[in-house]
Image: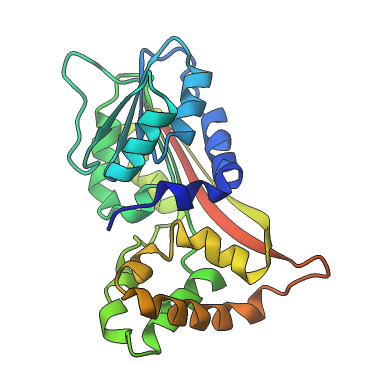
Amino acid sequence: MDWSAKQYVKFENERTRPARDLLAAVPTRQPRRVVDLGCGPGNTTELLLEAFPQAEIIGLNSSPDMITNARARLSGIRFEVADLTTWRPEPTAPVDILYSNAVFQWVPGHETILPRLLGLLPEGGSLALQMPDNLDEPSHVGMRDAAADGPWAGRLAAAAGTRTALGSAAWYYRLLKPHAARVDVWRTVYHHPLDGLDGIVEWFKGSGLRPFLAALQPEEREAYLSAYRTRIAPHYPVDAEGKVLLAFPRLFIVATR
């Protein structure tokens, strides 16, 4: 499953806000090298370039479409297609900050991959990541319910498991603290005003709905999205101005060696 950079950036301002909040909590202020793990279309990489203009910035993503768009956006930055589960920095090019915005909810095996990444950093280096923590929100329960109730149920069974269920804040603290001098963990709920139920659909067509839609034939997708709208409608009332408020919890972690 590839990702659509065009769809993702429809809500770039909203998606970039938690990236800024994460960056503000990184204690390393003069890094030599910063790697954006899962850089998307380059919006978060642009933040890193602004924050650390003297550092070498590298962007990695598993999606060729995202990398193509990131290269067009920031021509002077090195972007590469890479698998984050196996990637390692070059031995002669140590990295001071590993930064990741809204990526590791798609990557299983946090119990091994996160300590491994933290271990790649020198003393004083930071692993900073933010992950959506919304699998139990009506927006995502509705995806799974619509997938399980229809002619597509068999084909969409696997799509419901593509996201990694997150551990608690305490679980991540206990996982990383033996490898770090300091671990900060916090959870923030953002509330995004969107244009009705269609606004919610458009938002998640760039992220959470992707695995479900990718498994459907083109003529089935609108039927599935209609079923999805029906399931989320009671939870997102539309106000007099046609707006709904999307609650979006996110988990933040900054671990410093």
Describe residue 142's horizontal placement relative to residue 237 as left or right: left
Residue 201 found in image quarter:
bottom right
Foreground residue among 168 and 12:
12
- Is residue 94 left or right of 199 when viewed as pictured? left
Question: Where is residue 44 drawn, in percent x and y?
Answer: 47, 34
* Quadrant occupied by the N terminus: bottom left
Q: Nearer the viewer, residue 128 or 193?
A: 193
Q: Residue 222, relative to residue 168: is it above or below?
A: below
x then y, percent, for residue 166 = 40, 58
83 lies above or below 70: below
Identify which residue is drawn at 67% across, 60% down: 194
Write the residue at 39% across / 41% down: 40
In the displayed orientation, state which residue is furthest to the right.
240
In the displayed structure, 8 sits above or below 253; it is: below
Q: Residue at x 64, y 62 (%)?
A: 246
Position in image of residue 133 (x %, y %): 48, 58
Q: Does residue 44 appear to the left or right of 148 in the view shown?
A: right
